[in-house]
Image: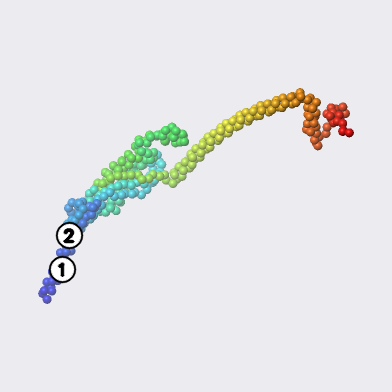
Amino acid sequence: MKASVKSAILTILIIAVLIALTSSFFTLQEGRQAIIVQFGRPVGDTITDAGLHFKLPFVQEVRVFEKRLLVWDGDPNQIPTKGREFIWVDSTARWRIADARKFLESVATEAGAQSRLDDILDSAVRDEVSKSELVELVRSKSWKVPEDEALELVPKELEEAIKKEVARGRQEITRTILNNAREKTPQYGIELVDVRIKRLDYVESVRQKVYERMISERKRIAAQFRSEGEGRSAEILGEMEKELRSIRSGAYRQVQEIRGKGDAEATRIYGRAYNKDPEFYAFLRTLESYKEGVNGSSMLVLTTDSDFYRYLKDAKPKK
C-alpha cells in the first residue's frame, strides 16, 4: 500500500514538473516581439530576438506583437478645400510598434492602436486639406505648365488654372501630415512611417457639374474640329473643281484643235476631188444633200426652175 502511494505521488510530481517546464519556455517567431506580463503588469525589457525564451510559470504570461510594418486605412472623408470645393479624401498610412511596453500600457492591442490612429490621422488630414487649394492636392511641386500647342484645346476660363504655379504640391502636403501626426504617436509606442493620399474625388453634386462642364468642353472641341473639317473639305472640293475645269478646258481646246485639223483635211480632200472632176463632185454632193435634207417629218417647197433636182430632171431613161 505504501509503495503504491509513493508511486502515485512520484507520478504527480513528475507531471507537475513537466507542466512547469512546459509553461516556463515560449518560442518567439521571426518578425514578432514580446512583453512578459506578471499579474497584469509588464516586467523586463521587450524581447525582440526570435527563438526560445524563459518566463516564470503560472505567474507570468507573454503578450506578442508585430515587429513588422502594419497598415492603416482610413475611411473616406468629405472635406472642404481652401477654395470651398468639397471632395472625398481617402488616405492610408504605414506604422510599426516601436515601444512594445508603452504600446501595451496605452492601447493594449492593434485594434486599439487603429482606433487611436483614426483620430490622429483623420484630424491631421482634415487640417491640411482644408487649408490647401485643390490644385495643390492634385499636382506635384514638379508640375510644369504644358506647351502652347497643348493649351490650344483648353478653354479660356480654365487656362489660368492650368498655368497656376504649384507652391507646395501633394508630396509636401502628405509630408506635413506625416510630421504633424508623428508628434502624437510616440506616447502610444507607435512609430508612424508614411502617410499617403490614395484617392481624391469630388462629392456627387460637384462631380455632376464637372461632368457637365467636361461634356460641354468636348462638344465645343468637337464643333471646332467639325468646322475646321468642313472648311478643309470646301477647300479640297474647290481645288478639285478648279482642276476639273482646267482639265475640261484643256480637253475642249484639244478637241477643237483636232476637229479643226480634221475639217481642214476634209476640205483639202474635197478640194482635190473637185479639181479632178467638178461635174462629178457636184453630182455627188447633190446626192448627199438629197439624203440629208429630206425626211418624213419635213416638207420642202421649191420653184419649178430650182436647180436642186436638176440632175433628176436631166436624167433620161434608157431606151
Quadrant location of the C terminus in the rendered image: top right
Quadrant location of the N terminus in the rendered image: bottom left
Label 1: how many Cα within 10 Å (few below 14, some 14–19, many 20+): few
75 displayed left or right of 188? right
Q: Which callout, 2 or 1, points at the residue further toward the start of the chain? A: 1
Task: Give the percent coordinates (x, y) of residue 197.
Answer: 35, 44
Q: Amino acid at mark 1?
A: Ile
242 displayed left or right of 73? right
User: Which quadrant holds residue 127?
Assistant: top left
Q: Amino acid at mark 2?
A: Ser
Q: Label 2: state its secondary structure.
A: helix
Q: Which mark is residue 24?
A: 2
Of 22 and 216, nearer the camera is 22
Label 2: how many Cα within 10 Å (few below 14, some 14–19, many 20+): some
Of 91 and 3, nearer the camera is 3
Q: Label 1: state its secondary structure.
A: helix
Q: Is residue 171 above or below residue 305?
A: below
Q: Which mark is residue 12?
A: 1
242 displayed left or right of 272? left
Task: Give the percent coordinates (x, y) of residue 287.
Answer: 80, 31
Residue drawn at (22%, 51%), measured in percent from left and top? 100
Of 124 and 232, nearer the camera is 232
Question: In this view of the protein, can residue 41 be seen by the observer?
Answer: no
Residue drawn at (78%, 32%), measured in percent from left and top? 292
User: Which quadrant holds residue 206?
Assistant: top left
Task: Give the percent coordinates (x, y) of residue 14.
Answer: 15, 66
Direction top: furthest residue: 275
Residue drawn at (51%, 37%), measured in percent from left and top? 225
Question: In this view of the protein, can residue 235 be seen by the observer?
Answer: yes
